[in-house]
Amino acid sequence: MVRVGVCGAAGRMGKTILEVCHDTAEVQIGAAIEHSESPMLGMDAGELAGIGSQNVKIVDDISSVTDDFDVLIDFTFADATINNLKKCQAAGKRMVIGTTGLSDAQKSEIELAANDCALVFAPNMSIGVNLCFKLIELASQIIGEDTDIEIIEAHHNQKKDAPSGTAVRMGEIIADTLNRDLKECAVYGREGIGDVRDKKTIGFETIRAGDIVGEHTVMFASAGERVEITHKASNRKTFASGAVRAARWIMEKDNGLYDMQDVLGL
Ligand SMILES: NC(=O)c1ccc[n+]([C@@H]2O[C@H](COP(=O)([O-])OP(=O)(O)OC[C@H]3O[C@@H](n4cnc5c(N)ncnc54)[C@H](OP(=O)(O)O)[C@@H]3O)[C@@H](O)[C@H]2O)c1
């Protein structure tokens, strides 16, 4: 039995992860954490997630519950995730990090912490998206140099970071495959009159609207045809199931940094 701590327990992903933990026979909800100003503190995590009482109260201090979980699943905000990472590192706890929007410096902190604990860090935990990462790599190898590449993503109107972590990872995969530096070749949105498109650029377009769970398209366009690789998530359970799968997988692993490609054996 794997005991999971859920950080950001009252959030969209947090509640879905609690639900998936409840539905997974080999997993037990060990702890639920929110920030110190959360009105949900003291509530039963199961009641909050609509799965009935789990006898796990929502607390604001990870250090007070480190004995109650084996692996922490964190879907919060960049700064909160880094704080939680330090606490898990000190307590020797494994961690699954789904938070997006981390700076390069914060990503380096995660890499460094992986010397002391086993971590899965992935901007998208759905199996379909991770399959798309592979398809995008293949398409980049075969037609990347001859096509204009654009990444279009859409999410709900509450999402704070843009472009999405998944879109950025798609851009990194394409840039790495084509020996380009994403920092130099990325173009974020377009407006006004400018030069015509430079073939070496990778374009990003962001849509924020309604309750869209998450949609990504990578377009490889040339004169006469275009290839589009699209993923559409219609339910957060796809991410939550991936996170819980990663939590079970990481229990057998040595210290180090892993991503969903490792978890899924891709
Ligand atoms: N990797 C993936 O597959 C994947 C999939 C979906 C989403 N995400 C990412 O996961 C993150 C969360 O997404 P979401 O849609 O669930 O957002 P959300 O609904 O805003 O949930 C975040 C939760 O974390 C809480 N929180 C804030 N600071 C905290 C702290 N210091 N300690 C504990 N909890 C804290 C928030 O509380 P308040 O609301 O009170 O501030 C909120 O309940 C985002 O970065 C998103 O991009 C990743």
Image (cartoon, grey):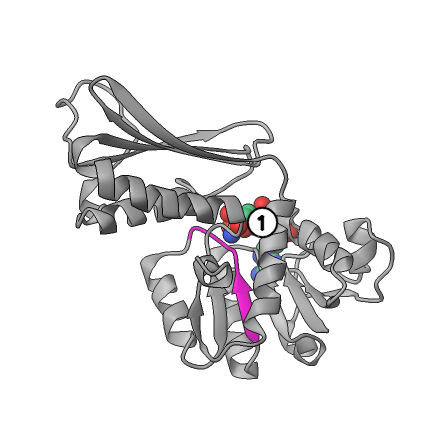
Residue 138 in sight from this viewpoint:
yes
Give the vertical position of 192 relative to 93 (above or below).
above
Q: Residues within 10 Å of mark 1 (few under 14, many from 20)?
A: many
Whether residue 39 is visible here, answered yes or no, is no
Residue nearest the observer in this picture, 182 or 258: 258
Q: Which residues are magenta?
A: 94-101
Q: Quadrant of residue 236?
A: top right
Q: At 72% across and 59% down in the image, what residue appears? A: 21
On-image quarter of the N terminus? bottom right
The x and y percentages for residue 207 are: 44, 29
**Helix, strand or loop status at disc 1:** helix
In the rendered image, residue 92 lying in the magenta stretch gets the answer no
Q: What amino acid type should be assigned to the residue bearing mark 1?
A: Phe
Q: Residue at x 19, y 49 (%)?
A: 181
Q: Is residue 192 above or below residue 57?
A: above
Circle 1 residue: 239
Seen from the viewer's position, the closer of residues 199 and 207 is: 199
In the picture, measured across the screen, residue 181 lies left or right of residue 151, that is left
Q: Is mark 1 within 8 Å of ligand 1?
A: yes
**Rendering coords of residue 214 (x, y %):** 52, 37
Which quadrant of the view contains residue 230?
Answer: top left
Residue 242's x, y, as percent?
A: 58, 54
Closer to us: 205 or 238:
238
